[in-house]
Image: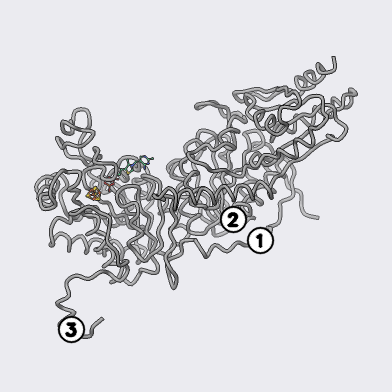
Amino acid sequence: MSDKLLMKGNEVIGEAAIIAGCRHYFGYPITPQNEIPAYMAARMPEVGGVFVQAESEVAAINMVLGAAAAGARVMTSSSSPGISLKQEGISYLSACELPAVIVNMMRGGPGLGNIAGAQGDYFQATKGGGHGDYRLIVLAPATVQEMADYTVQAFDLADKYRTVVMILGDGHIGQMSEPLVLPKPTGKTFDKSAWSLTGAKGRDQHIVRSLLLYPEDELEKLNIRLQEKYKLITKNEILYKTYMTDDADYLLIGFGMCSRLARGACDVLRKKGLKAGMFRPVTLWPFPSAELAKAAAGKKKILVIEMNAGQMIEDVNLAIGCSIPVDFVGRMGGMVPELETIVERVETYVK
Amino acid sequence: MSSNTRIKEQLIMKRPDSMFEMKNHYCPGCGHGIIHNMLGECIDELGVQENTILVAPVGCAVMAFLYFKMDGCEAPHGRVPAVATGIKRVHPDKIVLAYQGDGDLLAIGMAETIHAANRGENITVIFVNNANYGMTGGQMAPTTLPGQRTKTTPKGRNTSTEGFPIKACELINTLEAPVFIERCSVHNVPNIRKTKRALKKALENQIEKRGYSFVEVLSMCPTNWGMQPVDGTKWLEESMIPAFPLGNFRDRGAE
Ligand SMILES: Cc1ncc(C[n+]2csc(CCOP(=O)(O)OP(=O)(O)O)c2C)c(N)n1
Ligand code: SF4
């Protein structure tokens, strides 16, 4: 039996990154994720790693670029406004096919917004954010245990596909303390010797670049390669969870924090004799479209629950081909939907 | 190489071994090519070619790594010192070069410039000051001289609304951490030689793990200055050097 610990979500991300072999962290303070840089500042020297407090999120993401190009397992973390600043770098990382893990503990927006947990960066994370045709693998944990597990997994995914993986959490789960068992290292190793920058000793030079001036011979070819990679990721890496969906009449859908609410609402509704089930995408990209379509088949109604204006509804409707009516309960600006609101809304479907 | 010492002594120019046999893409009379060659010679003499990683800027030198038989990395516009920091923190024993233009280093990348210097990153920054944005067709740079005409200062840089040239060496010289700061020029042979000596010292500092070195090189951009190459060297000497005095500002390596 492994020990159960009580840890804060943000700190767990730091420890899980270290378990995964990350020895380079670059970040800039922003609430509600300040526990991550603080944890890394204390912990990295203990494991022979590097912590740098960068001068900005822009600098931090470019330090990530350098460290990833040099072949390291590297992570940065921030919250919404800081993630906006990182977008140019994320586009470069994607174009240069560099592996990196980026944590976004979302807060209320737009603008400076506030420091309460929110989910307003769904579009930014799943639809691009920066310029050009690229994708991130986006993992949305809902518990402190999952923060640990998915962080470890994120590093393997990043290396396996030479791509950027984002952990999309929010201020609530980042600040929450829950019992967990720390994951073990996966033991997977990835050979980076064919492309990483280590000095051209006894081999041809390696160049990490995204400037490809010839449209047909170079840049389109890179784009085609990227799209093929994204297809492969979509085929292999979709993660989702369901709760009492089989016999359900009503399907509640939420990611991260809102999946906890959806699950709680299902329990209350079942006690009231209403058959509700929950579908929860864990990878927001690739979105579990086929899996959702299957789970939704024959349901009377879908209710999407989010801490934003309904950003995920587009993906839900694409998945089910608008075959079932989709309703929405959401709060914005750092507010969390109330369980009673969700329950009451579902109750109106029977009347 | 020939063992004939007479030939060796007479050989005044050859392509550095650390550089590829290829024509460069720079305009006639451009300073970038000269600076590349000096850098290549230093790398040869110090024997660090296989151990060096060059970070190229967004600017005319965007593909600088194609000329050197070394590993190379691109950086978004202005972020060369941050990318170099990331590489150096992974490979503290490799030589990491940050090559930048004046728009890159002093405008969009000012924060990265100052903070990498202030952290005393053990890297070598090579700053090519040509008083304008070369790659995008000659707009005003932070180093554009008062009254100098550029695409975005068609009547000349107006200091009352556009400020004055930023002096990078003087600025960096206000910080504690840097170990070497020097401004050189490549407008004539004696100064090219001095530039090479400064580059070599800057590289030696990094090899010896002494810390951050900064070499500013005043460099010709005849194309965007609207001049013939020879007139470019003259304009550099007569207009740029008075505004950006040459010399060493700090040399802790020598202490
Ligand atoms: C974010 C961003 N903004 C603007 C540009 C366009 N751009 C490319 S090079 C350049 C200026 C380069 O000038 P400088 O740094 O002085 O180098 P030079 O070309 O003179 O050597 C600019 C503005 C860009 N590539 N990226
Ligand atoms: S535009 Fe200027 S800096 Fe660029 S290559 Fe031509 S001369 Fe050199």
B182 up-or-down from B70: above or below: above
Q: Is residue A197 left or right of residue A275?
A: left
B100 up-or-down from A325: above or below: below
Q: Is residue A24 left or right of residue B41?
A: right
Residue found at x 76% / y 22%: A342
- Going by the numbered disc 3, the residue's amino acid type is Thr
What secondary structure is marked by label 1? loop
Residue lying at the far top of the rendered structure: A351
- Going by the numbered disc 2, the residue's amino acid type is Asp
Image quadrant where residue A127 sits = top right
Q: Is residue B43 left or right of residue B130?
A: right
State the image coordinates of residue B77 (x, y, percent, origin top left).
37, 44
Residue found at x 67% / y 61%: A187
Dividing the image into 4 quarters, which one contains the C terminus of chain A?
top right
- Work out whether residue A180 can be spotted: yes
What secondary structure is marked by label 2? helix
What secondary structure is marked by label 3? helix
Q: Chain of mark 3?
A: B
> What is the spatial separation of the Cα atoms under label 3 and label 1, in whole angstroms?
56 Å
Give the numbered dot on residue A188.
1
Image quadrant where residue B185 sits = bottom left
> Are the residues flagged by discs 1 and 2 in contact, CB closer than 8 Å?
yes
> What is the spatial separation of the Cα atoms under label 2 and label 3, in whole angstroms?
53 Å
A40 up-or-down from B207: above or below: above
- Going by the numbered disc 1, the residue's amino acid type is Lys
Say few, some or many: other residues with alpha carbon within 10 Å of mark 2 (under 14 / 14 to 19 / 20 or more).
Answer: many
> Are the residues flagged by discs 3 and 1 in contact, CB closer than 8 Å?
no
